[in-house]
Amino acid sequence: MTSRFIAFRSKTTAIPLEYFWAILNCPAANAFAYCHLGKRDNLVSIIRRTPVPQVDSQGIARVVEAARAYLAAVSEEDALERPGASEKARDLMLRVDAEVLRLYRLPAPLERQLLDLFASRERAGVPFHFERYFPPHFKDCPPLHDLIAMTQDWPKTNRRRGTLIEKKVRRAITRDEEELGRLQELADLRIRLVAPLPLRELERLQQLQGEAPEWSG
């Protein structure tokens, strides 16, 4: 224990251990270790410098709730042998990462750069296959919690969008206008995510059309 492992202990009982578990397993902490530790051992002096977000009790509670949901799903006896269990566990893990990354308040392009650092790398220590956050064709940079909103939570997200559209039609929308704009952006992003246009085919078609002779009337 003293030579091969590093023990983390909370200095306060006010913060549940699941919060620290989520922070240490999140992309930010792993990226920090990847960039600063390239040898056999993880040095305590370096690990102590891992950036930790300054948060309030609500932020901690959201992370803890997501972490406990994931840990409960993968800890139940024979839980992962049930149909769809692996997909559910993967979705719950994404929620943990999303809640932690929300606390860091990174600009969306920087968060995307951080998550792409792990692309094509199999995630260790999880009972399912996971090697990337975004599919290769998707070049936009939404934060991870927005990616969840337009995939796992899309039925809920789209219902809210529909409600706001109806309010706008009735000219009853006021403070929700900004929220509607964001949801419309998510709808556009979802199209590019799940049904991307065949750009190569379109470019080829455009090229062929440019080469076609013009009709004379």
Image (cartoon, rainbow, N blue to C red):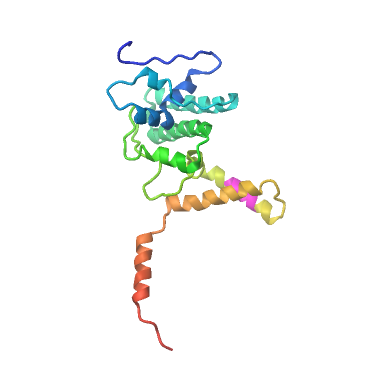
Residue 169 appears in which quarter of the rendering?
bottom right
Q: Residue furthest top?
A: 2
The residue that appears at 44% across and 50% down in the rendered structure is 193
Q: Position of residue 91 (x, y in %)?
A: 44, 35
- Decide whether the magenta segment is chiefly helix, strand or loop: helix
**105 w.r.t. 40: above or below:** below
Q: Which residues are magenta?
A: 159-165
Q: How many marks?
A: 0
Q: Position of residue 188 (x, y in %)?
A: 51, 53
- Image quarter (top left, top right, bottom left or bottom right) of the N terminus: top left
Horizontal arrangement in the rendering, residue 55 relative to residue 67 (left or right): right
The residue that appears at 38% across and 60% down in the rendered structure is 199
The residue that appears at 56% across and 43% down in the rendered structure is 156
Question: Does the segment drawn in magenta span residue 164?
Answer: yes
Residue 43 appears in which quarter of the rendering?
top left
78 vs 6, nearest the viewer: 6
Q: Is there any visible trace of residue 127 in the rendered image?
A: no
174 vs 166, nearest the viewer: 174
**166 w.r.t. 23: above or below:** below
Horizontal arrangement in the rendering, residue 65 relative to residue 202 (left or right): right
**65 w.r.t. 163: above or below:** above
Residue 90 appears in which quarter of the rendering?
top left
